[in-house]
């Protein structure tokens, strides 16, 4: 038994300690009534937060596709003194 405990790696020990720290937080949430209410409110609101986040990701994808569509034909200037800011590594 003791040999198995000694052979555990450091990563395993840190994982076990993290689990105990998280359990301590949940125990504290159960003990304090106001904190318990806040935690329950967060758990109830979590699905709505996921929906809002997915909507924001959808808007980001739409704007990325729209930007690629609108600026795909922009050509890199051949002269280096044009002052446009476009170059081989900074273009659309």
Image: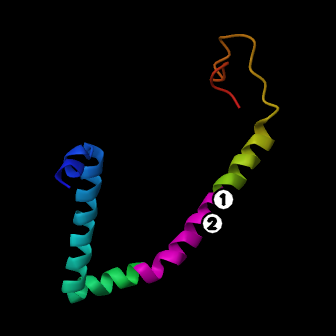
Quadrant where the C terminus lies?
Answer: top right
Residue, disc 1: 59
Q: Position of residue 83 (x, y in %)?
A: 63, 19
- Count how many numbered circles sit on residues in the image: 2
Please indicate whether residue 62 sits to the left or right of residue 33 in the image: right
Task: Please give the name of the residue rendered at 22% of the width and 89% of the height, measured from the top-left corner.
Answer: 33
Dominant SS of magenta comes to helix
Residue nearest the observer in this picture, 4 or 37: 4
Given the current orientation, which residue lies at the most extreme right position? 73
**Residue at position x 28%, y 63% in the image:** 19
| Color scheme of the displayed model | rainbow
Q: Which residues are magenta?
A: 43-59
| Residue 71 in picture, x, y percent from top left | 76, 37
Q: Residues within 10 Å of mark 2 (few under 14, many from 20)?
A: few
Is residue 68 left or right of 53 when viewed as pictured? right
Determine which quarter of the picture holds residue 44.
bottom left
Under circle 1, the secondary element is helix
Rendered residue at 78%/29% (across/down): 74
Q: Is residue 6 above or below residue 84?
A: below
Q: Position of residue 7 (x, y in %)?
A: 24, 44
Q: In the rendered structure, does residue 25 fall within the stretch colored magenta?
A: no
Q: Is residue 44 left or right of residue 55?
A: left
Give the CA distance from mark 2 to mark 1. 6 Å
Q: Nearer the viewer, residue 21 or 3?
A: 3
Give the image location of residue 80, x and y in percent.
66, 11
Please report the residue visible at 82 percent of the width from the left and 32 percent of the height from the top.
73
Q: Which quarter of the rendered picture does the N terminus lie within?
A: bottom left
Residue designated by label 2? 55
Labels 2 & 1 near each other (Cβ < 8 A): yes
Determine the image quadrant of residue 52: bottom right
| 56 is within the stretch colored magenta | yes
The label number, if any, that marks residue 86 in the structure image: none
């Amino acid at each position: 038994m003791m040999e198995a405990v000694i052979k555990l790696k450091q990563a395993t020990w840190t994982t076990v300690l993290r689990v105990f720290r998280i359990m301590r937080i949940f125990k504290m949430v159960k003990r304090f009534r106001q904190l318990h209410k806040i935690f329950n409110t967060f758990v109830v609101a979590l699905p709505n937060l996921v929906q809002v986040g997915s909507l924001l990701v959808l808007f980001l994808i739409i704007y990325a596709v729209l930007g690629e569509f609108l600026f795909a034909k922009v050509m890199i200037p051949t002269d280096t003194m044009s002052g446009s800011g476009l170059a081989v590594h900074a273009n659309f």
